[in-house]
Image (cartoon, rainbow, N blue to C red):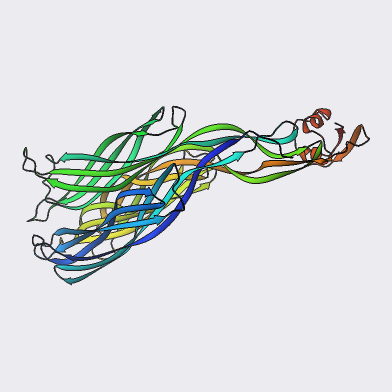
Amino acid sequence: MEYPTESRFLRAPAAVLDTVAEQLADVDLTLPDYCPDIEKILKCTLIPKLQSKSLSGGQLRVDGSCVVNVLYVESTGKTIRCCEQSVSFSQSFSLRETPENYVVLTKTKPEYINCRALSPRRLVIHGAFSLYAKVLSVGQSEIFTPPEGLETLIKPAECADLTALCQEQFTVSEEISAADKPPVESVLHSSVTAGINDVKAVKDKLMVGGELNLRMFYLCDVETGETAKLDYVLPFNQILDCDGVDENTRNLLCCEVMSYDVRLKNDIMSEKPIIALDVKLCLTEQGYVMREEKLVCDAFSVEYASAPRFDNLKTVTELLPVSESFMEKLSICVDSGKIGKILDIYADSLTLNAAPADGRLSVSGKVNLCMLALDGDDFPMFVERSCDFSHTLSSSEGCDSLCFGRVRASGLSFRLADDSTAEIRVELKVTGGAMKNECTRVVTDVEVFEDQPLSSGDCALTLYFADSGENLWSISKAHNTRLEPLMCENNLEEIDLDSPQMLLIPKL
């Protein structure tokens, strides 16, 4: 006999695809006529950009392009120039089935790039990057509801229930006036990062406020090779349609910069060009509601022989949004020669790991710093250093994992400490959701054998001499009695005994 039970479920994200594919980028680059010859290559970079990601008919398709950017010293005026070329790519991943509700998470990581000059005007470039793809849907675990007639061991727990899972891609465009800056002749390096500052939820809608940070290093005088920098912060707002969110939802948001484009446009109101910025963003939301649950850890029948079935239930018992900034002091030293003037320093790539430490989450990773400078003879130089960072998140007490973990360089300043050392202060911002995960062995159902009734015995009362550390639940189960009368009969409040004692076991 199996007791009929009421169905209750706890929902959580479930990965239906988690894979990676390598994409090759082979470019035969010939300088256009307006670019001077190459004397020395300073830096060759792969910049993957995603244009779209779609899931249909059991196929996930990701389309994009890979920009190969070459910074070099030109042969005539010994100034810094840039040339780049884009290569399109498309990658498909197979799924067994297309889930009803899903989100697609993607990430790119440059692996290697080799650049060989065939002539002062022609380069052959071979590179590769990894494309990571993950598809999340809503998975659910059934929580056993005990019927009347069973004796149960209950563990109260606060559990996070996934009530909303949604995603939206959109574009933010802005025309930036550089009237108060040196004129922009050519963009040498640019980067765009995104962050979320504010989230408000109403019924089935999310109002998200964030900001984009454009950093640009550019050539402002072709004749002299003079360069300049631009930092621009662009606020954005977006409303997401997201079933299942409301004012009580705990929202975990991931903001991904899929691609961006920086172009120069002529301005009829000024001799200086306008900077046209287009950024494609992808917002992903996981919305949770904290529920008080009673988990059944063991069960038996006092009337018939019974056999409970068990399984491990993974739950999230704490969920805290994380948005925390901290400063890191780093340095770049040149191995030979000296630094005459620093032109620009930027963070090229960052990695992030999170692990529990002393009751909180500790984050660590590497930041790749790139320095463009002039040496003692005013010849351009490029220096690259990988630096470690670590920080303990103050808003992660009791948590052991970080969901949607992201780190970005939200601010950077530098100075020349001596002839061979640059000191850098970089503000790093970590965002995501700190979680406390638990795994509990729970009952999934109980089979009762009505053809095997249990004998109550002839004794009205049983004496049992218990040792210290014994568990009253185990004693009641072994003697086929209920836990509550056993505790009342012996005036006990705790289920675990802290000393040896004689127990009176009542007969049912």
On-image quarter of the N terminus: top right
Residue 413 vertical placement versus 33 (above, below): above
Residue 204 vertical placement versus 266 (above, below): above
**Relative to 340, 95 lies left or right:** right
The answer to whether residue 328 of the structure is visible from this angle is yes
- Residue at 45 percent across and 52 percent down: it is 17
Occupied quadrant, residue 111: bottom left
In the foreground, 298 or 301: 301
The answer to whether residue 338 of the structure is visible from this angle is no
On-image quarter of the C terminus: top right
In the foreground, 295 or 423: 295
- Residue at 72 percent across and 35 percent down: it is 152
- Please provide percent x and percent y for residue 303: 81, 36
Residue 304 vertical placement versus 47 (above, below): above
Instruction: Count the marks.
Output: 0
- Please provide percent x and percent y for residue 190: 23, 50
Residue most extreme to the bottom: 118
**Relative to 465, 401 lies left or right:** left
- Please provide percent x and percent y for residue 121: 14, 67
Residue 216 vertical placement versus 83 (above, below): above
- Please provide percent x and percent y for residue 26: 26, 65
In the foreground, 422 or 278: 278
**Relative to 26, 322 lies left or right:** right
Residue most extreme to the right: 458
Occupied quadrant, residue 92: bottom left
